Image (cartoon, rainbow, N blue to C red):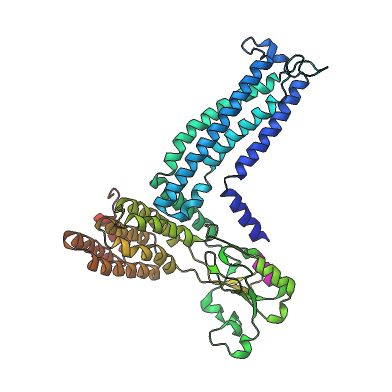
Amino acid sequence: MRARILRFANQLHESYWFVPTIMAVAALLLAAGMVWLDSHHATGWMDRLPWLYAARPEGARSLLSSIGGSMIGVAGTTFSVTIAAVVYASGQYGPRLLSNFMSDRGNQVTLGTFIATFLYSLIVVRTIRSPGETAGEPAFVPQLAVLVGVLLVLCSIAVLIYFIHHVPSRIHINSVIERIGDRLIDEIDQRFPVFVGNPLDEGEDDHRIPDAFRPDADAAAVERRAIIRAKRTGYIQLIDDEALLETARESGLILRLQYQPGDFAHRGSVLVEAWPDEALDGDVRTVLRTAFAIGSRRTGMQDLRFLIDELVEIAARALSPGVNDPFTANSCLDWLGAALSDLARRDLPSRLRADEDGQLRVIAHPLTFAGFIDRGFGALAQYASADMIAGKRFLAALGDVALSCDAPARIAVLAAQARAFRDLADGALRGANHAAVLERADELLRALAQSDYKRRLRDGRAWLGGTA
């Protein structure tokens, strides 16, 4: 259930209707409150201020009608501009970036401000009474409410000026890449090294894995696996790891996850395998199934691969023959290098996760440094290897990641990636471009082959600051 609640909260964050709706309701309450204050003679202080002239019924009605009409017109215009910007950005940078613009709080507040001002004016103008308009009722002009309406107009003008600046700045490609890169770095900071319980060292604790989950399990052991299947089709958006761990501990189960956030599951596919099967009842099955939130698209809530894929998609589009924009690809490589450099300094969790008592409870998909490097640099290699500008920045980003690595195994991963990129560039480039990229690749490989590779990289001309 918690997974579904978190998914719903994320959907609200990425919707255009939620914030404007809240602001519209607040405007209705504000209008009612201001009219109530006016009706209880709380505006006597305004008579003592000579620059606050009391409005007559016709003047107040005309003013509020003008405010309401203009605000709904401006709201329609800003909504059209927003939709046009979203369509342009999704077509230019990729349709998967649409959620980034949908969740933009500035656009939501702008639309909500104009709608709220319109509704406020509409409610207040209905309370104005001219002399003799209603039998037995005196004339009534909510002076304080009218004043607040004028203040809302001033706020709306300020928001309009902000919006005019905000839209072009948000669709600027560097701003788009920066938001994705920042979120990727933040997610890395939040997720590692903590992930689903306490880690177990696989080298020493492999014996804790039940025979039913071992590759060489016999038929009798496999039959003791219980299976929890998906009831809908879509992408795994969120996994409630706390619910999985707590349920496994309370029921005495060991769970093996078949999917991770970002994977596509169809109805009937196996989400979780549980052992032993006799400890699993209907209620536990329901809890385990609802720990997975499935939706129509991938999100960045728990899926680091999705955020990496967004950077890769922008860079790949930029390096396509129809666009041919290597400098946009360079920006993506810079942020990708920064994120993976941060990841290189962290311990990635074991796939074996234990409860507070040290008992194995969850077997998850392994998260490896090589997997993340291949997801980012490996996916971009075929595009960057055909362009000299992007190719040199690709190798520089690999070098930046190496400067954050201390583990020899991770340096070997980076060296293998550099060798693979060199082979691709060797076949894709010609002439001076070919020589420049291969020279840079050889320089990186020579440095990574030495024990003092960090000093060699810092001394190398390609990894000095200001090489942009």
Q: Residue at x 52, y 29 (%)?
A: 158
For the residue pair 416 and 312, the one nearer the viewer reads as 312
Q: Up-down: is 13 above or below 65?
A: below
Where is residue 111, by image quadrant? top right
From the viewer's perspective, is 251 left or right of 199?
right
Viewer-proximal residue among 363 and 220:
220
Q: Position of residue 463 (x, y in %)?
A: 29, 55
Give the image quarter of residue 432: bottom left
Q: Which residues are magenta?
A: 243-248
**Which image quadrant for residue 308?**
bottom left
**What percent of the width, then of the height, locates residue 353?**
59, 71
Quick one: which residue is furthest to the left in this view?
A: 431
Question: Along the horizontal axis of the image, is 55 left or right of 266?
Answer: right
Q: Is residue 342 visible?
A: no
Q: Is residue 434 above or below residue 88?
A: below
Q: Is residue 395 left or right of residue 407?
A: left
Q: Can residue 46 be seen from the camera position used here? A: yes
Q: Give the residue displayed 50% in from the left and 35% down from the top.
A: 77
> Residue extending furthest right?
136
Within the magenta stretch, is there residue 251? no
